Image (tube, helix red, strand yellow):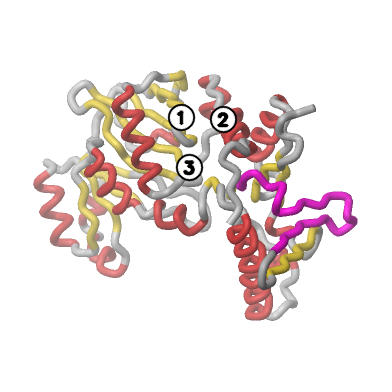
């Protein structure tokens, strides 16, 4: 009988999320149980019952046909794996927009609020993850911890950008604070034609940084005290500002222990358990911190560099040695 048999880890994710399924598979290999719960299916395919009284409280999630029932007392931990996705409200254009939006907010408040109230171990707490996603805050904490960061300007003032570009000898990249709803807008070199359009910045600030030339990039995934690093080797004959959009050779990489410890410290400073971190290495600058992604992707590095991230997430998610209920 599995030592995990009496507990269940939960992953709140879209039903077809491949990262979630990879962790479920890893859990099965160690004899543990992890259940994927798609928040968009709440009130459609599963129900919630939370009772809170003077001296006791209970929570139960059950499928509509009652084939699956999960009590709060059996939940070892939760991984909030990008739980905000496609909504059922979008499938019915005849619904009044204000009503469907309100119902969606109420569903989230009931489900996430109940789970947060009962389960103490979360990868990651939704509120803390949202705060940790702010890039200016990340850079400040990374700098204080002792990681090398690029010279950075965050502004909506065109004059300040021009002065910054001059101070960096014209080698400046720019990027957004977050991801737009549609597509991906990568880090780009600030060209002369961009400088001519800086007046648009007055209503929409951006992040400007010195361009860091390097030998290779690092994608590090932090899970608790463990760090899984992949080296992304790109064609150095061409300057690359965002290696998500170019072909790279992905191999495992052993980070210096000092860098590993600082990455773990950075993630823990936001009270998180999980995050993916992007760095660039060069002989001149060493490891330069770019950004942390509290809900970042790791599976491609696991597949190409044979890292055991899914196994580690599964192990920590079902570990009851630090079994926490509020």
Question: Where does label 2 land, which residue?
Answer: 312
Question: Where does label 3 land, which residue?
Answer: 273
- Residue extending furthest front? 55
Q: Which of these two is toward me, 133 or 1?
A: 1
Q: Mark 1 packing: few (<14 Cα in 10 Å), some, or many (20+)?
A: some
Q: Earlier in the sequence, mark 3 or mark 2?
A: 3
Q: Position of residue 236 (x, y in %)?
A: 31, 22
Q: Mark 3 packing: few (<14 Cα in 10 Å), some, or many (20+)?
A: many
Quadrant holding the C terminus: bottom right
Question: Which corner quadrant of the image does residue 160 belong to?
Answer: bottom left
In the image, is 54 to the left or to the right of 60? left
Q: Earlier in the sequence, mark 1 or mark 3?
A: 1
User: Please, what secondary structure does the residue beneath circle 2 have?
Assistant: helix
The residue at the point 68 percent across, 69 percent down is 52
The residue at the point 14 percent across, 55 percent down is 162
Determine contact: label 2, label 1, CB under 8 Å. yes
Q: Earlier in the sequence, mark 2 or mark 1?
A: 1
**Dot label at residue 239:** none
The residues bearing labels 3 and 2 have C-alpha atoms spaced at a distance of: 12 Å
| Residues shaded magenta | 57-78
Q: Position of residue 224 (x, y in %)?
A: 47, 36
Quadrant holding the N terminus: top right
The residue at the point 58 percent across, 58 percent down is 116
Q: Position of residue 175 (x, y in %)?
A: 33, 50
Examine the structure image and report whether residue 114 is included in the region drawn in magenta.
no
From the viewer's perspective, is residue 168 above or below residue 109?
Answer: above
In the image, is 87 to the left or to the right of 198? right
Question: Where does label 1 land, which residue?
Answer: 226
Q: Main secondary structure of the magenta part?
A: strand
User: Please, what secondary structure does the residue beneath circle 1 have?
Assistant: strand
The residues bearing labels 2 and 1 have C-alpha atoms spaced at a distance of: 8 Å
Q: Mark 2 packing: few (<14 Cα in 10 Å), some, or many (20+)?
A: some
């Amino acid at each position: 009988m599995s030592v995990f048999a009496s507990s269940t880890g939960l992953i709140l994710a879209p039903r077809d999320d491949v990262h979630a399924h990879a962790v479920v598979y890893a859990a099965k290999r160690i004899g543990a149980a992890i259940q994927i719960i798609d928040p968009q299916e709440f009130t459609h395919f599963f129900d919630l019952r939370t009772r809170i009284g003077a001296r006791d409280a209970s929570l139960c999630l059950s499928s509509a046909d009652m084939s699956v029932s999960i009590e709060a007392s059996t939940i070892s931990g939760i991984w909030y794996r990008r739980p905000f996705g496609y909504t059922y409200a979008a499938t019915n254009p005849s619904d009044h927009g204000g009503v469907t939006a309100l119902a969606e907010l109420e569903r989230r408040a009931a489900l996430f609020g109940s789970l947060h109230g009962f389960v103490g171990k979360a990868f990651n707490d939704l509120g803390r993850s949202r705060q940790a996603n702010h890039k200016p805050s990340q850079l400040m904490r990374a700098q204080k911890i002792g990681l090398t960061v690029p010279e950075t300007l965050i502004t909506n003032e065109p004059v300040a950008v021009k002065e910054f570009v001059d101070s960096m000898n014209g080698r400046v990249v720019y990027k957004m604070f977050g991801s737009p709803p549609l597509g991906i807008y990568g880090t780009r070199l600030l060209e002369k034609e961009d400088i001519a359009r800086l007046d648009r910045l007055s209503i929409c600030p951006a992040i400007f940084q010195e361009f860091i030339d390097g030998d290779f990039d690092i994608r590090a995934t932090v899970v608790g005290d463990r760090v899984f690093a992949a080296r992304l080797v790109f064609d150095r004959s061409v300057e690359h500002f965002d290696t998500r959009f170019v072909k790279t050779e992905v191999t495992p990489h052993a980070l210096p222990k000092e860098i590993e410890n600082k990455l773990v410290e950075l993630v823990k400073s936001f009270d998180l358990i999980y995050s993916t971190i992007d760095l660039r290495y060069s002989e001149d600058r060493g490891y330069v911190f770019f950004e942390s992604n509290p809900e970042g992707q790791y599976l491609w590095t696991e597949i190409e560099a044979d890292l055991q991230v899914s196994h580690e997430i599964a192990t920590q998610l079902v570990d009851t040695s630090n079994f926490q209920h509020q």
